[in-house]
Image (spheres, rainbow, N blue to C red):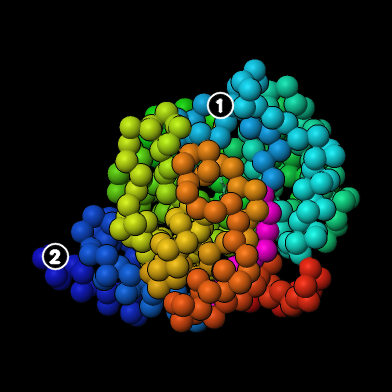
């Protein structure tokens, strides 16, 4: 088939609401021009989400940066003896939660390193202390890689680990740790940590317990188009099985201070392509997030017309991307987020972690039905 015929065939499928194949995905990734990708992704996005663009009011907590692993893309981790290392105490956790409460945050996003001198109970206590300090806040905590580490520490199955966390106050799982599922790429960028099958099994176990979770893909390093499509297909298959994923977040590799600092940072062109490609391939995901802290406010804003319907939140205290050279502010006000969204002609809607509409009076809030 000629280039034009193949593109026309894929466009017709998208317009008819039909599922794209892995071959279609590879063609789009390698050959389609940005504006065609964007036009098709925007069509799907408006069908699913209308004119709404979601954001939330959240804070981050990275309880420790000490980590047994050495992922080559990571600038955040620290050795135990490095002056950069830190570990939160219970009081520091409480202080962060009270700060979140004063700001009216609906969510606390918790991910960190895997500290080899901390037992499983320490990680459960982080969740418990947050929950006891302010039961209303939604705790989105621990990537699949962290859950896999807890299984290694306790020698217990994933559902047992997850149940302990749920009992302590866990509300959902963030999408990190997925990186690129292809085993040959994984062995180059994060050799020792949870393998792809474990990551997928953990999210399956979470969905079976009624937890919702997110998914990510780290792009723009040593992976190729075929690896990105394989990654999206594995996520789409699991979502067909469980329906438990809420949002997909394509994560742009930030090279500064990492083991791959010689690589260039992905360009705005690639960032927008990945947003659009993921919107087109993940037809069973309700939301695609353009995480502004990682894309920059400008690209995140444009992404709302290239397939994304969510730009994440106010995000106070971000470390992972700032350690790796992100120049974005460490937080945005609601007024700034509204301006970014409104300028694109979209309607800003504050959501909670489970995509329920937030009704707010200052720092006080309630939620209504899922959107
Ligand atoms: O797994 C680490 C990524 C992830 C770098 O669920 C990097 O809403 C780029 O889980 N360049 C953790 N990426 C972050 C995470 C997350 C982030 C935003 C939203 C959500 C959500 C979850 O950060 C890691 C890794 O893929 N990461 N270092 C880097 N230098
Ligand atoms: Fe550790 Fe996570 Fe960084 Fe890998 S990405 S080195 S697991 S903190």
Q: Residue furthest right?
A: 132
Q: Position of residue 193 (x, y in %)?
A: 54, 30
1 or 2: tag closer to the N-terminus: 2
Residue 3 marker: 2
| C-alpha distance separating marks 1 and 2 | 44 Å
Q: Please identify the quadrant where the C terminus is shown.
A: bottom right
SS category of the residue bearing label 2 = helix
Relative to the observer, which residue lies in front, 133 or 256? 256
Q: Position of residue 149 (x, y in %)?
A: 65, 32
Q: Residue furthest top?
A: 81
SS category of the residue bearing label 1 = loop
Relative to the observer, which residue lies in front, 239 or 174? 174
Q: Residue at x 88, y 50 (%)?
A: 132
Q: Residue at x 36, y 40 (%)?
A: 221
Q: Is residue 265 above or below residue 67?
A: below
Q: Residue at x 15, y 71 (%)?
A: 5
The stretch in magenta equals: 52-60
Q: Position of residue 14 (x, y in %)?
A: 33, 74
Q: Is residue 170 above or below residue 367?
A: above
Q: Is residue 356 above or below residue 269?
A: below
The mark closer to the camera, 1 or 2, is: 1
Q: On the picture, is 136 further left or further right than 206?
A: right
Q: Is mark 1 within 8 Å of ligand 2?
A: yes
Q: Main secondary structure of the magenta part?
A: strand
Q: On the picture, is 106 further left or further right than 23?
A: right
Q: On the picture, is 369 further left or further right than 21?
A: right
Q: Which residue is mark 1?
A: 69
Relative to the observer, which residue lies in front, 154 or 262? 262
């Amino acid at each position: 088939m000629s280039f034009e015929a193949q593109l026309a065939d894929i466009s017709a499928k998208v317009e008819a609401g039909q599922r794209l194949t892995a071959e279609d995905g590879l063609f789009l990734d390698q050959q389609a021009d940005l504006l065609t990708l964007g036009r098709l992704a925007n069509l799907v996005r408006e069908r699913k989400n209308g004119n709404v663009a979601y954001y939330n009011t959240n804070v981050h907590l990275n309880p420790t940066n000490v980590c047994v692993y050495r992922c080559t893309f990571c600038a955040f981790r620290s050795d135990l003896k490095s002056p950069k290392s830190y570990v939160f105490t219970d009081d520091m956790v409480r202080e962060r939660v009270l700060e979140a409460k004063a700001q009216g945050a609906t969510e606390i996003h918790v991910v960190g390193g895997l500290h080899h001198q901390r037992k499983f109970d320490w990680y459960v206590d982080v969740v418990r202390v947050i929950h006891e300090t302010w039961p209303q806040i939604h705790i989105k905590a621990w990537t699949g890689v962290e859950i896999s580490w807890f299984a290694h520490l306790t020698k217990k199955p994933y559902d047992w680990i997850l149940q302990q966390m749920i009992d302590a106050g866990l509300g959902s799982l963030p999408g990190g740790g997925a990186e690129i599922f292809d085993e040959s790429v994984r062995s180059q960028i994060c050799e020792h940590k949870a393998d792809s099958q474990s990551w997928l099994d953990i999210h399956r176990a979470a969905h079976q317990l009624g937890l919702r979770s997110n998914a990510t893909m780290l792009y723009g390093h040593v992976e190729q188009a075929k690896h990105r499509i394989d990654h999206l297909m594995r996520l789409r298959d699991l979502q067909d099985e469980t329906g438990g994923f809420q949002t997909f977040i394509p994560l742009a590799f930030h090279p500064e201070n990492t083991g791959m600092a010689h690589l260039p940072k992905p360009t705005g062109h690639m960032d927008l392509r990945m947003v659009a490609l993921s919107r087109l391939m993940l037809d069973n995901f309700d939301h695609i997030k353009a995480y502004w802290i990682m894309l920059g406010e400008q690209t995140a804003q444009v992404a709302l017309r290239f397939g994304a319907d969510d730009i994440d939140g106010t995000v106070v205290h971000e470390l992972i991307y700032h350690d790796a050279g992100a120049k974005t502010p460490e937080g945005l006000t609601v007024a700034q987020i509204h301006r970014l969204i409104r300028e694109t002609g979209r309607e800003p809607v504050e959501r909670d972690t489970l995509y329920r509409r937030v009704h707010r009076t200052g720092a006080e809030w309630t939620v209504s039905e899922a959107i």
